[in-house]
Image (cartoon, rainbow, N blue to C red):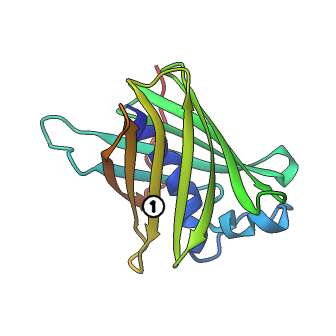
Amino acid sequence: MTATCRAALALAVGFALAVPGAETAPLAKELEPFRPFLGKTWRGEFKNSTPEKPVVDVSRWERALNGQAVRVVHSINHGAYGGESFIRWDKAKAAFVFHYFTTAGFMTTGTATFSDGKLVSHEQVVGGANGVTEVRATSEFRADGTLFVKAEYLKNGQWTLGRETLYREEPKAELKFK
């Protein structure tokens, strides 16, 4: 389920290209691109999702640590898998740095930057995730208000397609855990 982890982070950072939101509390200057998404809930369906076997990710973004970080919590299929990310700006790296903790017992750390209007992230997996050791993802915020996230996983020395997910804002979606 490592692909699922990437969705939450990529989605949060990828939304940095969107329109203004309602959050008004102080936020670190570098995190301002996230403001339009704070306090909102998003729902994403994986490309391989079917009515018989749905794969749905619900995520919520919040201001955290007195505005020095963004917190993203997500849950797939009502808590079958989930995680929590903290994103902050790292001045020395000139990039967003994130830490992601999962219900599966592993974690990741990574960086993300904007390139050609897309958010590009790369992370290292710690603690085992079905053999996946690294993840690369690209997030594209589209004019219709959706976010498309595509991730690749490094497993056994080979990069393979991990997942593709399309997200839409859905205020009534419920974030659930077991």
Q: Residue 2 appears in which quarter of the rendering?
A: top left
Kindly identify the residue that appears in the image at 44 percent across and 25 percent down. 129
Picture coordinates of residue 44, whole percent (x, y): 37, 51
Residue 141 left/right relative to 70: left
Mark 1 Cα shell of 10 Å, populated few (<14), some (14-19), many (≥20): many
Q: Quickly name the residue at label 1.
A: 138
Picture coordinates of residue 120, whole percent (x, y): 53, 62
Rendered position, 143 above or below 99: below
Q: Quadrant of the N terminus?
A: top left
Residue 153 left/right relative to 93: left
Q: Nearer the viewer, residue 32 or 23?
A: 32
Residue 116 left/right relative to 52: right
Picture coordinates of residue 50, whole percent (x, y): 15, 43
Kindly identify the residue that appears in the image at 68 percent across and 69 percent down. 33
Kindly identify the residue that appears in the image at 34 percent across and 53 percent down. 165
Q: Nearer the viewer, residue 93 or 20?
A: 93
**Residue type indicated by callout 1:** Thr
> In the image as oriented, which residue stretches furthest toward the left?
52
Kindly identify the residue that appears in the image at 40 percent across and 40 percent down. 154
| Residue 42 visible in the picture | yes
Rendered position, 112 above or below 84: below
Picture coordinates of residue 46, whole percent (x, y): 29, 48
Q: Residue 31 appears in which quarter of the rendering?
A: bottom right
Q: Nearer the viewer, residue 71 or 151?
A: 151
